Amino acid sequence: MLLVSTTKGEKMTNQEKISPSFQTLFKKNSRILQRESLLSLNFFPDIVVARDNQMHTIAQNLSSILNNGDPANMYIWGDTGVGKTITIKHVLKILTDGIKEDGQDILIDIVMLNCTVIKSEITACIEILTQLTKVTIKTGLLFYNYMNDIWSVVEKKASEHAFYTLILVFDEIDSFVEPNDILYQFSRALAQQSILANNVAIEIIAVSNKKDFLHKRLDDKVLSSAAFTFCNFPDYNEDELYEILQLRKGAFVDGAINDDLIHYCAKQVAEKYHGDARRALKIIYASAKRAENENSSIITLGNLISAEQVVNNQVTLEMLQKITLHDRMLILASHLANKIINQMNQKIPAHTGIVLETYRKICYLTGAEPNGDTYMSSRLKALDAQQIIQANFRKGHGNTKFIEVANDVELIIDNLFPQDFNDIIANNYCDIESIIVTKLKKGSDGMTC
């Protein structure tokens, strides 16, 4: 052990030199976790589980690169956490490593664009140039200026190799505000001679959890130009999730978690959360942290159950924070209306008219301009389709819909808005209550969805 001399000539060990405060607050050795990185969502495993068919499809669409040809653009879709991004990265790594091992003079640049962050064509161009050149890109230019810079970089790289391929991965492309122009420019770059080099290929891989994104959001000319081939990622089943979690078991100290708990987690996620592997990893990790906080050496079923609820709340909140302010105010209006109706011992939930009246009151109190009833009724339909609310008919009430907030959304309702917003609602609760009571007494059927 290394010894450190003190001014008095005494010997002090490294352990003795560490401050008591550090040792109290930060525990170096966990009784539960030994390699937390294995549970990170950013961890890149050597083995991709249950995606052999998808890997073969992706590889087949890219194989033309090996013969200096044009790869097929791809649209890859499947629900959240079913391995789309990790599989794409895995196949691309095999491709680039294989080309190097084979000694071919083919350069492949892979640009990953997270469209939940990079949502516009300008920011996308800046990110593409940044990844290609590794330098800081000047901001404030027009779209076509950035595209011309990209073409110049591509031609320079192509001039240095026998063949050059630029692969653009638009991950979660459904979050991109207006993708038509940029997809069209890249899909037509060679045909329109934006790039003059004849040893270039450009591959577009669009990734989404929405099956119908292409036909709902893209123009016909873009669909025709890009000619996407489709690759579907199904949900993981219980056995596949169990295998995925087993591959991460090295994150735990021996004996800290047993196989029955791993199997339980896999079963729960497969049955309740469409086989979302990310959620399974989050639950396992959160359960480990709960066990650590209890100073336990093992993870219990109770830890796992409570961790599932915490993760579910986090995922629900993250999802709701991405929707518009007015959609969130609709959710809050539904919650408040039903809360007040329940306090009046009414058995039937709030109908659409009461919810919209409450929404308008919330807008007035918080200084927001309310949208029209017809549009907000359509938003109630959309929220119902997303299972954020339930909008149902009731026997004996004609075509009137009654609105309830989903249980998991109810649990995090207080976190949908900043504290000052919540304070305004709390301070004016009686006013909101008054309009709902008045609406009920009038017996109005309100509007229908």
Image: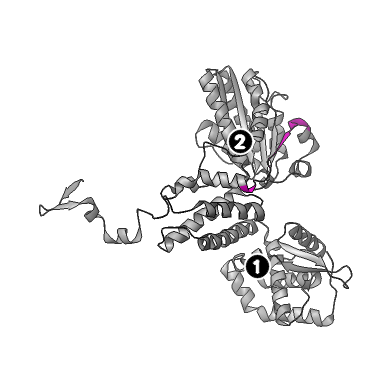
62 and 370: which is toward the camera: 62
Q: Which amino acid lies under the numbered mark 2 shown in the image of this protein?
A: Ile
- Residue at 57 percent across and 52 percent down: it is 263
Q: Residues within 10 Å of mark 1 (few under 14, many from 20)?
A: some
Residue 88 bears which disc, if any? 2
Task: Please give the residue where the numbered disc 1 appears in the rendered image.
Answer: 410
* Magenta stretch bounds: 224-238
Q: Can you give x and y, in whole percent of width and height, for residue 369 in the image?
A: 72, 65
Tell me: 291 left or right of 129. left
342 and 277: which is toward the camera: 277
Q: Which SS class for mark 1?
A: helix
- Residue at 58 percent across and 49 percent down: it is 278
3D distance between C-alphas at marks 1 and 2: 36 Å
User: Do residues under tags 1 and 2 come within 8 Å of each other at their CB atoms?
Assistant: no
Q: Can you give x and y, in whole percent of width and height, for residue 225 in the image?
A: 76, 31
Q: Which SS class for mark 2?
A: helix
The extreme left residue here reads: 9
- Residue at 85 percent across and 77 percent down: it is 444
Lower sequence index among marks 1 and 2: 2
